[in-house]
Image (tube, rainbow, N blue to C red):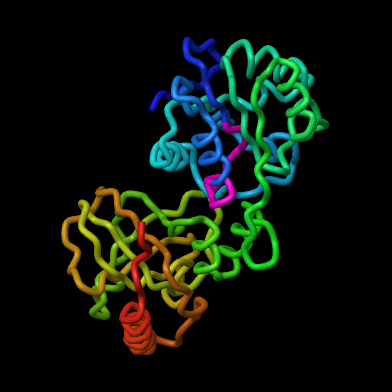
Amino acid sequence: MQIFDTIKKTEYNTAVALGFFDGVHIGHQAVINACKNLKKEEEKLTVFTFKNSPSNTLSSKKKPLLTTNEEKFYLFEALGVDIVYCVDFNEVKDLCAKTFVYDILCDKLNAKTVVTGFNYRFAKSGESTAEDLEKLCSARCVNTYICKPVIFGDAPVSSTRIRESIKNGHIETANKMLGYNFSIESPVLSGNHIGTQIDSPTINQSLNSVRVTPKFGVYATRVTVDNNIYYGATNIGCHPTVGECSPICETHLLDFNPSDLYGKKVKTELLHFVRSEQKFDSLETLKEQIKTDKHNIQSFLFEYKEPTE
């Protein structure tokens, strides 16, 4: 997969999926898959997106993201995308609709097919809609398709809904809307070794300040270490019992005793919310609660079925 961070003219005919695609959730996947199904054989499946959030660029109130750009690229590649244009939103935010469609999509990207979601907006101040895009593309004989919303429950899937689900501990709902498990992927850090003192050695990972922070508490998790899969009891939070204040992801692996993992990149997928974070009177009380948490997580995992590809 080719990735460009500037709008350079391509030598290929392209089928272009448009959007910011934060989370690359099942609604976004529907847009990219529609583009894949509509494109002609000679057209390269292309995503045109932004390295910085349009809403965060235009507003002083910043929203946390579901995915980093690196994570988005991984998900795009898994969907079969050939080319990604991930450009600075400031490059296009003040363009009029005609300039964006004719100069960028048609002339630079050589788009023959364009696909976007029902709520897509573009051009200066977001004044133009998906229907405006369709009319402009039609004038240049570009095939256009507007995807209908993907419904989960009684409302369209959206990055906002997923973000709120994660914040509120509804991780299974979030994962269904994402189409994969929300995860924390970062190197293992050296901790305070409290877990070892209470017979529950753990691995510690930092939280990315750019991404949405899950509800503080205990989760059943699926952990990938060196391509091996284990299951764990993960606490996300500030560890009030031992007086820490910086949020961290701390995982006790149920079927593996971690040793010498410092610096290794580990992927921790959140599967099920067990309980909210609590402050305990003593380490002994915490130790007893961890036993209960492990039992509850093992009961969940006994019934848990890995999603099919």
Highlighted range, magenta? 17-29
Which is more toward the observer, 153 or 144?
144
Residue 193 is situated, as x and y percent measured from the top left of the image, at 28, 68
Q: Quadrant of the C terminus?
A: bottom left
- Left/right placement of residue 10 relative to residue 199 reads right
Does the magenta-highlighted stretch encompass residue 19? Answer: yes
The image shows residue 159, relative to residue 16, as above or below, that is below
Q: Quadrant of the N terminus?
A: top left
Residue 216 is situated, as x and y percent measured from the top left of the image, at 52, 69
Residue 168 seen in the current view: yes
Residue 210 seen in the current view: no
Residue 129 sits in quarter: top right
Name the residue located 30 percent from the left edge and 53 percent from the top edge. 266
Which is more toward the observer, 271 or 100?
100
Which is more toward the observer, 89 or 105?
105
Name the residue located 49 percent from the left edge and 80 percent from the top edge. 275
- Left/right placement of residue 216 relative to residue 88 reads left
The image shows residue 16, relative to residue 103, as above or below, that is below
Residue 179 is situated, as x and y percent measured from the top left of the image, at 48, 56
Residue 296 sits in quarter: bottom left
- Left/right placement of residue 85 relative to residue 220 reads right
- Left/right placement of residue 125 relative to residue 45 reads right
Residue 135 sits in quarter: top right
Q: Count the marks.
A: 0
Name the residue located 51 percent from the left edge and 67 percent from the top edge. 171
Residue 175 is situated, as x and y percent measured from the top left of the image, at 49, 62
Name the residue located 52 percent from the left edge and 56 percent from the top edge. 178
The image shows residue 15, relative to residue 191, as above or below, that is above
Does the magenta-highlighted stretch encompass residue 60? Answer: no
Which is more toward the observer, 130 or 65?
130
